[in-house]
Structure formats: C-alpha cells, structure tokens
Amino acid sequence: MAKTRTIISDDLRRDKRPQGSELTKDDVGRVLDYGFGRVLENDVGKRVWLRDGTFSMENDDQRNKRKGPKVGDGATCYIGSDSHACTVIAVSPSGHTVTVQRDKVTRMDTNGMSDCQEYAYEPNPDGETYIATRRRTKHGTIYRVKGCSSIRVGFGARHEHYDFSF
C-alpha cells in the first residue's frame, strides 16, 4: 500500500478546508480512496490538499520532517556507510540545534560479517552525545553534527548498521 493516500470522502469536501490544513481527531474513521480504508489515529496531524477534485494526504516521513524532531524520538547518525542508533535528548526552542545520544544496541542475528543485520535498541544514559545543527542545502534541510560535517543525523527511526567491507 502506498504511503500517500487520496481522500474522497464527501464529508471532507463539504468542510471546505484551506490548502494544507491538518487532519483532526474528528476525521478518524472517514473514508479514504478505493479500498485503502479509513483515516486512522496515526493520520491525525497530517496535512491535506485539494488536487484534481480529491484530497491528497502527506505521508509519515513528510509529516515528521515538517514537525521536526522531538525529545524521545528515534534518530540515526550516518557516518560514511555505517549507521548508529540514537535518541533525541534535547531540542532548542527554534529547532535549529538538536542533541542526540547513542543507544545501547544488541545484535539479534547470527549472520556474522553480513550486510543482513538485525538489532534491538534501548536508550543509554551513558552513551556518547552529538550536537547537530540544521543546515539548508540545495537538496533540502539536513542536520549535521557540529564540528564534524561528515556525520549526518536523520530523525524518526533508529537504525544500526556496520559495513564490514571497509
């Protein structure tokens, strides 16, 4: 199922919403396009637009990027071809600076030096911390670790991966 869904409910058309308005708790249960079901609890807060007579809804990744990181969210530090799981522990009021802390990771598979890796994550209060700042580039908004521009930080999910080929 595609993450971007089209809403065709007559109720939403009658609402005459402005472009980019967010779904509310009152929308939960309203009908979506052809067999995709109804608006779910986790769709609350997503924006909708009227396009070609239908509403289109932003996906989870788009909403998370727009809302920005929050304390307690999962994060991933990308260092070369490796990825390290982290947790957001502080966000400046402007959202320009974010502090993340390395999680405790436990490898769950028995694949050895393979690219197929599975990990369990838990917060680690003694983990290494990184301070990342928001930067605007021609490719969009990114966060990079202060003092080491080769480390990028992504938000919304924890991911650990070691590339054994380097």
Image: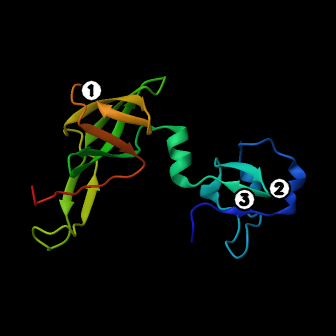
Q: Foreground residue, 73 or 124?
A: 73
Image: 152 above or below 14: above
What residue sits right under mark 3 in the picture? 28
Provide the secondary structure element on which disc 2 rests.
helix
Element type at mark 3: loop
Instruction: Relative to 111, say whether 52 is above or below.
Output: above
- Under mark 1, the amino acid is Lys
Q: Secondary structure at mark 1?
A: loop
Identify residue type, mark 2: Leu
Q: Quadrant of the C terminus?
A: bottom left
| Picture residue at 83% right of the left edge, 55% below the top | 12
Residue 65 screen position, x and y as percent: 50, 42
Q: Residue furthest right?
A: 14
Circle on res. 12 = 2
Q: Which residue is mark 1?
A: 146
Where residue 149 appears, as percent x and y from the top left, is 25, 31
Report whether residue 20 is seen.
yes
Q: Is residue 156 left or right of residue 45?
A: left
Amino acid type, mark 3: Val
Crowd tier of the residue under label 2, counting other residues whose Cα lies within 10 Å: few below 14, some 14–19, many 20 or above: some
